[in-house]
Image (cartoon, rainbow, N blue to C red):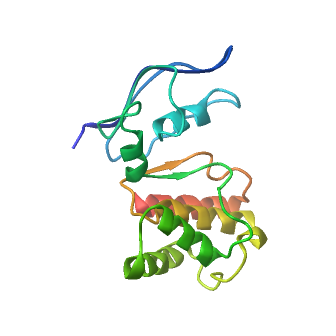
Amino acid sequence: MNAYLIETEDLRKSFGKVIAVDGISLKIPTGSIYGILGPNGAGKSTTIRMLCGLLTPSSGKASVDGLDVYTQSEKIKQRLGYMSQSFSLYEDLTVLENLRFYATIYGVRGKEREERIRQLIAMAGITGRERQLAGTLSGGWKQRLALGCALIHKPQILVLDEPTAGVDPVARRVFWELIYKLA
């Protein structure tokens, strides 16, 4: 086990002439809950997307659980669950169909898939909403479903990008209670 789950050194990302991330260095200990804070446009989401293997850094070094973000991004993706700020749900699918879709993407099949879905529906408190279209859910319910989708493959690392943006204070509190139970 690595002492640091995430390490970056002088990590940078540019989009043409626009510098989105300018030399961030981090050491995030294994087993911690860690937040990256800053104003809009500071590069938080870009940093997260680089660490998740979704964007290639322009320069610098970065590793997640000892895996290099440049050369081992596919292995990184298998080890983490990522919940983006826009929730990445298919609004024309039901809650159950969304969970099954993400399970299939992550290679969770058969009895294991159905058992995992059952567990996540209970954990997220969305029992009774399995047949409801994701597009008809409130922000708080979408948030819980998105968390279930991010956890479907039992990831070792959970990455959340502004997970409580746009939800009411009660839904926000319930969500963070869930996160602390998972930690």
Residue 147: image quadrant is: bottom right
Residue 129: image quadrant is: bottom right
Residue positioned 40% across, 33% down in the render: 69
Question: Which x, y percent locates residue 36?
Answer: 53, 35
Question: Which x, y percent locates residue 144?
Answer: 60, 66
**Front one among 88 and 182:** 88
Question: Which x, y percent locates residue 6?
Answer: 37, 35
Question: Which x, y percent locates residue 28?
Answer: 38, 35
Asked if residue 21 lies left or right of residue 75, the reply is right
**Front one among 110 and 87:** 110
In the displayed structure, 138 sits above or below 121; it is: above
Residue positioned 61% across, 52% down in the render: 163
| Camera sees residue 168 | yes
Asked if residue 71 lies left or right of residue 178, the reply is left
| Camera sees residue 177 | no
Q: Quadrant of the C terminus?
A: bottom left
In the displayed structure, 171 sits above or below 6; it is: below
Asked if residue 111 lies left or right of residue 163, the reply is left
